[in-house]
Amino acid sequence: MTAARPRVYVAQPLFAEVLAPLAAHAELAVEPVEGRRDAAALAAGLREADAAIVTIAERVDAAAIAGAARLRIVANVGVGYDNLDLAALRAAGIAASNTPDVLTDTVADFAFALLLGAARRVTEAERWLRDGQWQRWSFDRLLGRDVHGATLGILGMGRIGQAIAERARGFRMTVLYHNRRALPPALEQACDARRVEQDELLSRADFLIVAVPYTPATHHLIDAAALARMKPDAFLINIARGGVVDDAALAAALAAGRLGGAALDVFEGEPAVDPGLLAAGHVVLTPHIASASRDTRRAMVAMAVANVLAALGHGPQAGRPPNLVGG
Ligand code: DGY
């Protein structure tokens, strides 16, 4: 009698060709329809699974895994994993993994896309053009803010923060950062960036990019008080996670003209977006796509596949999934 093949639940219809290596070792149960899984559908998928691949759109908490007696690993397709309740997974003896590094450059590229888009009013100008307004052109319309030579503040100087600093060189920006710990001097020199305290960062940055992970300690790190410290013509760019910025406070600051503008890829309670942000001018809003390049999203899924294969005892890292998180 042959042993039953393990079952791998995949919570989104991810790239079939990238998932294919799993099929040699497991039954694949891939959700056929994109969109957010509700709690019941997710729990049902996890219940029969030996391993699961989820995205940051799925919240894997104690309730989701309550009936998942066979589950060995939840492989998150994302470097951030605040969607996983690590304590609940640990208590249930379920491993968790993420997809670091592979998206660093793609996210850093996108941080600059947002920064430039907001500074130079790209999306606003496009709306104006599509609206048939070009006849009303005037020399002083849609004036933006120069990026070259400006001061860039990076809040959170991990791998993505460092990759952003690298890009800022091409724009001859002065780069300041705040991180709990300073980078080693050689790395700081390589990034051409100087560590300052958070208040100084807020008050000196012309463009502030938020790149910290979301944890209880970073919840509303950028709140009304932090926004009030920023220059009245500064721009805030959030590529980290919704919840690090108090979106309602940001919308209020924008409405009151206390900030130059903002560019946001992540939102508190996404996919919902604070109506105040939707109504604000000088704001670029994107639906959490910082890592969404053709190659990078595939590479992220491939990493999740490698983690699952290892957890199921296959491949060069059998028994040792390479990207475990949460101890
Ligand atoms: C991540 O990997 O955490 C990104 O936010 C996903 O796009």
Image (cartoon, rainbow, N blue to C red):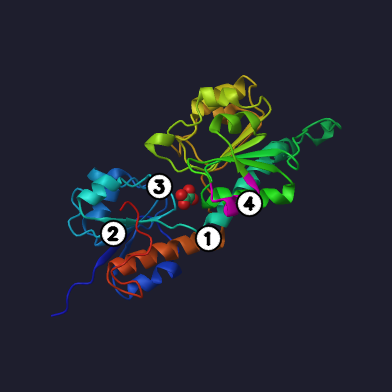
**Which comes before the other along the chain, label 3 or label 1?**
3
Mark 2: give few (<14), some (14-19) or many (20+) Cα within 10 Å.
Answer: many
Counting residues from the start of the chain, the first of labels 1 and 4 encountered is 4
Mark 3 / mark 4, whichever is N-terminal = 3
Helix, strand or loop status at disc 2: strand
- In the drawing, does residue 307 fall left or right of residue 128? left
| Of residues 170 and 278, the one drawn nearer to the viewer in this rendering | 170
Q: Earlier in the sequence, mark 2 or mark 1?
A: 2
Element type at mark 3 = loop
Q: Measure how far apart labels 3 and 4 are at the Cα level.
A: 37 Å
Q: Residue at x 46, y 60 (%)?
A: 300
- Tell me which corner region of the image, top left, top right, bottom left or bottom right, holds residue 19: bottom left
Residue 57 numbered mark, or none: 3
What's drawn in magenta, residue-wise? 183-193
x and y percent of residue 190 in the render?
Answer: 63, 54
Q: Residue furthest top?
A: 256
Residue ID for mark 4: 189
Residue where numbered disc 2 is placed: 73
Residue at image position (27%, 71%) is 313
Residue 224 image position (x, y, % from top left): 52, 23
Residue bearing mark 1: 296
**In terms of secondary structure, where does tag 4 sit?**
helix
What amino acid is labelled 1 in the image?
Thr
User: How many C-alpha atoms fall within 10 Å of the one at disc 3: few (<14), some, or many (≥20)?
Assistant: some
User: Is residue 142 something one can see in this rendering?
Assistant: yes
Mark toward the start of the polypeptide (4 vs 2)? 2
- Residue 65 visible in the current orientation: no
- CB under 8 Å between discs 2 and 1: no
| Magenta region includes residue 143 | no
Instruction: Determine whether, in the image, residue 29 is placed left or right of residue 67.
Output: right
Asked if residue 173 lies left or right of residue 236, the reply is right
Q: Which callout, 1 or 4, points to the residue nearer the camera?
A: 4
